[in-house]
Image: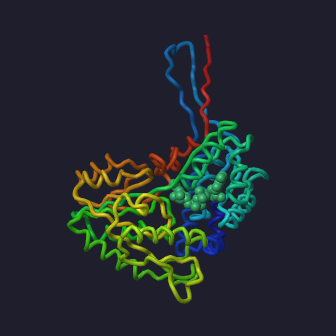
Amino acid sequence: MQKAAALIEKNGDELAQLITLENGKPLWEAKKEVGTAVSWTEYYAGWTTKLSGDTIPVSLPGQFLNYTVREPLGVVGGITPPNYPLTMPLYKAAPALATGNTVVLKPSEDTSLVALRLAELFREAGFPEGVVNVVTGYGETAGAALANHNDVDKITFTGSTEVGRMLVKASAGNLKKLSLELGGKSPNIVFADADLEAALKGVFMGIFFCQGEICSAGSRLFVEQTIYDEFVAQLAGMAKSVRLGHGLDPETKMGPLVSRSQQERVLGYIEQGKAAKANVLAGGRKPDGLLAEGFFVEPTVFSQVTNEMTIAREEIFGPVVCALPFKDLADAIRQGNDSPFGLAAGVWTRDLHKAHQAAAALETGTVWVNCYNAFDNASPWGGFKQSGWGREKGPYGLDLFTQIKSVVVNFT
Ligand code: NAD
């Protein structure tokens, strides 16, 4: 695994280019993704020498010894979306391999080449044939075949909540284990007492990084009503200044969406927002001119949104933020939690009490305080409510790919 990490690093420029060409994201973002891929693979390489069980203090100590071992599950199927073409397959493969499983990856149909190149690098690193496999194809054919297969012991999935539900049904045949990293509609909450300069940057990156095609996107922005107009106007100003362009152009700050269908989906939501009388402060359309033929959507800021509108309830998965005012902490929590999703949340305040009260009350798998999208290999990741099952990353991630065997020895 250490050799695989080194090969990913060595071939980083080529992988970054491939990511940009397939996904559209700017090269500088693709390079960051390669860096994450290297450190992630190294992180789980480290776990291979640290997988231990427990000795259990059973009630008849002089007579029975009880110990546990972690064993692999067997064949792990990994089904992934296109927003992180390199790290998504690796989020599945690295912990699965580190714990002794084999993997069959089914990458997004929009970004298969990166996954195929990754499998080549694992081969080059010395993984035996058959240990790292890639099956390309569409979800309803290749993905469904993997999910229904009786020789697959586990599916680890990242994608939409809708497909997650299908996988629950598909796994029933052999009761394969299932972990799900699903969609989100994350609240990012800005109190008037926050460091507003930092909050503005955090909110901007929280929604517009990766073209907004990120599960944790802070797509519902709640701003305390005393600063709402000013804060949202500033955010709109920043959104208007974003330079869209080809991912390989070094001047580009935001690339196109991953596909024509994703572009149409996002533009469709924007039209629904306009029809519901939300106010477009920035963007709200695809660009004209040279970029008109690409899958671009202008970074979009909606004000005058209510939490009941479709644009505030459904995941858009694009560069669109809905800004809503709130009165006080209780109101922010009530509105923030009023969602079927529970992936992540952000809180911006200088008041320690408010920060901890919000962190305790928000029904999300992660709460970021005075930061956003602050990920780490060691920090658990996963959703409450309809945002998923299980926790990836860190030691929690080991539980998704192993089963505990309990050995009881009678030595009397
Ligand atoms: P998607 O659910 O449409 O597709 C994801 C993967 O599932 C693709 O490989 C697709 O081919 C496959 N698939 C589709 N139908 C299938 C079926 N019937 N059986 C088996 N596999 C099937 O999602 P998408 O549009 O590619 O990606 C965006 C979604 O991913 C968003 O909802 C986003 O929030 C989610 N996501 C979640 C996380 C997280 O960590 N929670 C991270 C990134 C993306």
Identify which residue, 326 or 106, lies in the foreground.
326
Image location of residue 386, percent across then percent down: 48, 48
Q: Residue furthest bottom?
A: 289
Image location of residue 335, percent across then percent down: 32, 54
User: Which residue is found at the position 43% from the left and 63% from the top?
Assistant: 311
291 over 408 or under it: above or below:
below
327 over 101 or under it: above or below:
below
Q: Residue furthest front?
A: 275
Identify which residue, 9 or 380, lies in the foreground.
380
Q: Is residue 100 left or right of residue 60?
A: right
Image quadrant holding the C terminus, namely top right
Residue 266 shows in this picture: yes
Image location of residue 65, percent across then percent down: 57, 20
Ligand 1 quarter of the rendering: bottom right
The image quarter in which residue 372 lies: bottom left
User: Which residue is found at the position 38% from the left and 72% from the top?
Assistant: 301
Residue 38 shows in this picture: no
Image quadrant holding the N terminus, namely bottom right
Image location of residue 21, percent across then percent down: 64, 75
Identify which residue, 303 or 122, lies in the foreground.
303
Q: Is residue 327 left or right of residue 138?
A: left
User: Which residue is found at the position 72% from the left and 53% from the top?
Assistant: 132
